Structures are given as C-alpha cells and as structure tokens.
C-alpha cells in the first residue's frame, strides 16, 4: 500500500463527533414495515459491520445513510448532516460500494478510475488508488476482462477516488473465492489504516470477525445486539471450549472427572464447556495435579466465534 497516513491528532480524536448516528430509524415499503426503530452509532475510524438475515434491512439502512432512500421516521446523522436533505454536501465525503452495480465494459481500469477522479475537487492520485486495491498490474485491462473479485476491487477504487472520510461497503465479497476475499480484506484493512470510517455489511461471519471493530445484528426491524465480537459473544452466552486428551486414568474409570465442570469425553478427547474460561482452567489444572495426571496433553482453549454467537442470537430471536 502506498497511500500516506496523516498523523493522528489525539485531542481532535477525543472531541471528534460520531461518524454516523442513527436513532429510532423507521422504514416502510408501502404497508410493510422493514425497520421499526433502529439505533446505532459508528465512531470515526472504525470498521462497523451490520449483520442480519436476508431481508433484515441492511441494504435499506445503508441506502438511507447514503441518501439514496427517504426514511419513514427517526433521526439520522452522517458526518454531522442529515443525508435526506443534504446529500450534495455528503457526496464528496462518502464513498459507496453498492451491493450490485455495473461498469462500462469496454473501458480500461486506469481510464475508468481517472474519469471518476475528475468528479472530485481533491481526488487521490491514480497510482495510489490502484495500489490500495491491488490493481496496479491491471491498469490497462478492459473492465469486461476482469474477474468478479477484480471488479469488486475496482468498485473500491472508485469509491475511494474522492478521498472520502466514510466508506459504505454492502456485501463487498459475496460470491468470491477465498483468494479474492483475502485481497478484498487487505483493501479494507488498507482503508482502515488510513483512518477511514467503514460501514460494512456481510453474511460471512469470519469476515466480520476479522475486519470489524464492532458489529450490530439487525433482526426484526431493530438492532438486537451491538458491540465488539467479544462483547457480542458474551451477550450471546456462548461458552468457551477447553479440550484436552483424556488421561488414561480417566478413560479406564479410576479417576473421576471434576463434578463442578461440564466435561464430556468422546473417545480420546475431553471437552469442557465453560462460561468462565479462567475459572474452569484453574479447576481443571488443580484437579489434574491432585490426581497426579501430570500436564493435560493437547490442552487447547477455543474462544467462541462470532458465528457461534450470531447463530445463537438470531435463532434465539423472535423468528
Ligand atoms: N424498493 C423496495 N420496495 C419494496 N420492498 C423492498 C424494497 N427494497 C427492499 N424491500 C424489502 O425490504 C426488506 C429488506 O430488504 P433489504 O434489501 O434492505 O435487506 P437486506 O438485509 O439487505 O437483505 P440481503 O441480506 O438479502 O441483502 C426485504 O423484505 C425486501 O424485500
Ligand atoms: Mg442487502
């Protein structure tokens, strides 16, 4: 990546207003209420990920924030202004990658990015834009010859052309192979390191876990849960898993497992599910020492994934 990062000003950061503020957002399509009271904030410089099942209203929310859709009710501030009536003021400060979009297929990559740059008063240099999205080598390629993943990264370059403060990415990696997804992730991480604020939607929970500072789960018209991946996992009450090779003495029944812990032995492997990993580990090691079991072989602690938490929260919801 070749874009230069401006030095952060800690005082300015402390008093910086929110990048996005959403309160009681409502949206209906005809008689159908899609959003019934959505609340969330996005802080400057963070990657914020909106999750939720198909049809939950993620794209609707993003389009309202971008100023493409008029909301039914509630208040929305994007970079301090209401996108419903000040979209023109936001145009230069936000970058948008839509869930689906088209390009002139005959154009060449460098040409197209350059045309886009001309729309903005202070565009990022072409070379930098291509480098950030790893398309430098494809500068002279025709758009119609690009793969889906390359096209998506071209979307990014266009979204960045005006050097926006805030970037919206609606399902940036849907349908990509693992290699293309990783390249997109690298592009998003590059944006983040430049201090850009990013609002992302995705159905890939590993992607959200990897990229997001905070996630919000949208379901049944509202944000049901919001926080860092760890906070969300805690809220979902997903246990930590501690596994180890069951000692021979346990397998032949001469040593009993500690009754205070939820441990199941399956073949050679013992798996303990614990709400508090530190407490469980302490008890487990004390039990092993007291019973002369030595070090527990292959001891591993697996923290809950966002996927575990999401599935628990969404399935446990009112649906
Ligand atoms: N222009 C429209 N007119 C009528 N209904 C719409 C319109 N756009 C979206 N909807 C409906 O609103 C609901 C929310 O759609 P939206 O596209 O915001 O969901 P989403 O969370 O982005 O879903 P996905 O994960 O599939 O992208 C859906 O039931 C959809 O059918
Ligand atoms: Mg969508």
Image: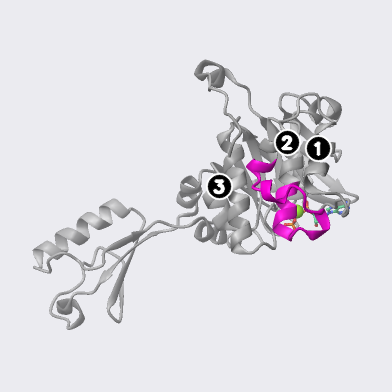
> Is 60 in front, or is 10?
10
Q: CA distance from mark 2 to mark 1?
A: 7 Å
At 60% from the left and 53% from the top, the residue drawn is: 183
Residue under pointer 2? 126
Which quadrant of the figure contains the N terminus?
A: top right
Element under disc 2:
helix
Element under disc 1:
helix
Q: Which mark is residue 114?
A: 1
Depicted 158 relative to depicted 102: above or below: above
Q: Callout 3 environment at 10 Å: few (<14), some (14 to 19), or many (20+)?
A: many
Q: Callout 2 environment at 10 Å: few (<14), some (14 to 19), or many (20+)?
A: some
The disc, 1 or 3, on the residue closer to the chain's N-terminal end is: 1
Residue 68 image offset from top left, x and y in percent: 85, 40
Q: Callout 1 environment at 10 Å: few (<14), some (14 to 19), or many (20+)?
A: some
Q: CA distance from mark 2 to mark 3?
A: 25 Å
Which quadrant of the figure contains the C terminus?
A: bottom right
Q: Confirm whether the magenta stretch covers residue 92.
A: no
The disc, 2 or 1, on the residue closer to the chain's N-terminal end is: 1
Principal SS element in the magenta part?
Answer: helix
Kindly check if marks 2 and 1 are in contact, taking CB atoms under 8 A apart as contact: yes
| Mark 1 or 3: the one toward you | 1
Most extreme residue toward the right, as rendered? 30
Residue 7 image offset from top left, x and y in percent: 53, 22
Q: Which region shows up in magenta?
A: 130-154
> Is 288 in front, or is 2?
2
- The image quarter in which residue 74 lies: top right
- The image quarter in which residue 292 lies: bottom left
Residue under pointer 3? 211
């Amino acid at each position: 990546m070749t874009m230069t990062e401006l030095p952060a000003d800690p005082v300015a950061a402390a008093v910086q207003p929110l990048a996005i503020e959403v309160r009681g957002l409502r949206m209906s399509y005809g008689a159908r209420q899609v959003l019934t009271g959505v609340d969330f904030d996005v802080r400057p410089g963070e990657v914020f990920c909106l999750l939720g099942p198909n049809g939950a209203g993620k794209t609707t929310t993003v389009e309202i924030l971008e100023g493409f859709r008029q909301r039914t009710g509630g208040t929305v501030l994007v970079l301090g202004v209401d996108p419903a009536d000040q979209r023109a003021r936001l145009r230069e400060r936000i970058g948008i990658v839509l869930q689906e979009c088209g390009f002139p297929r005959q154009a060449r990559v460098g040409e197209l990015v350059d045309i886009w740059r001309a729309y903005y008063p202070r565009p990022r240099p072409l070379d930098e834009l291509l480098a950030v999205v790893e398309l430098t080598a494809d500068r002279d390629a025709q758009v119609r010859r690009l793969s889906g993943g390359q096209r998506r990264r071209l979307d990014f370059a266009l979204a960045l052309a005006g050097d926006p403060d805030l970037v919206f990415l609606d399902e940036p990696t849907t349908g990509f192979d693992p290699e293309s997804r990783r390249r997109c992730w690298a592009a998003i991480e590059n944006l983040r390191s430049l201090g850009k604020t990013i609002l992302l939607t995705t159905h890939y929970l590993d992607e959200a876990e990897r990229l997001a500072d905070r996630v919000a789960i949208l379901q049944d018209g509202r944000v049901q849960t919001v926080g860092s991946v760890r906070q969300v996992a805690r809220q979902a009450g997903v246990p930590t898993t501690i596994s180890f090779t069951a000692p021979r003495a346990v397998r032949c029944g001469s040593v009993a497992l500690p009754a205070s812990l939820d441990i199941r032995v399956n073949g050679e492997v013992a798996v303990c599910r614990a709400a508090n990993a530190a407490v469980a580990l302490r008890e487990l090691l004390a039990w092993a020492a007291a019973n002369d079991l030595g070090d527990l072989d292959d001891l591993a602690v697996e923290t809950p994934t966002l996927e575990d938490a999401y599935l628990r929260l969404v399935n446990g919801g009112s649906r």
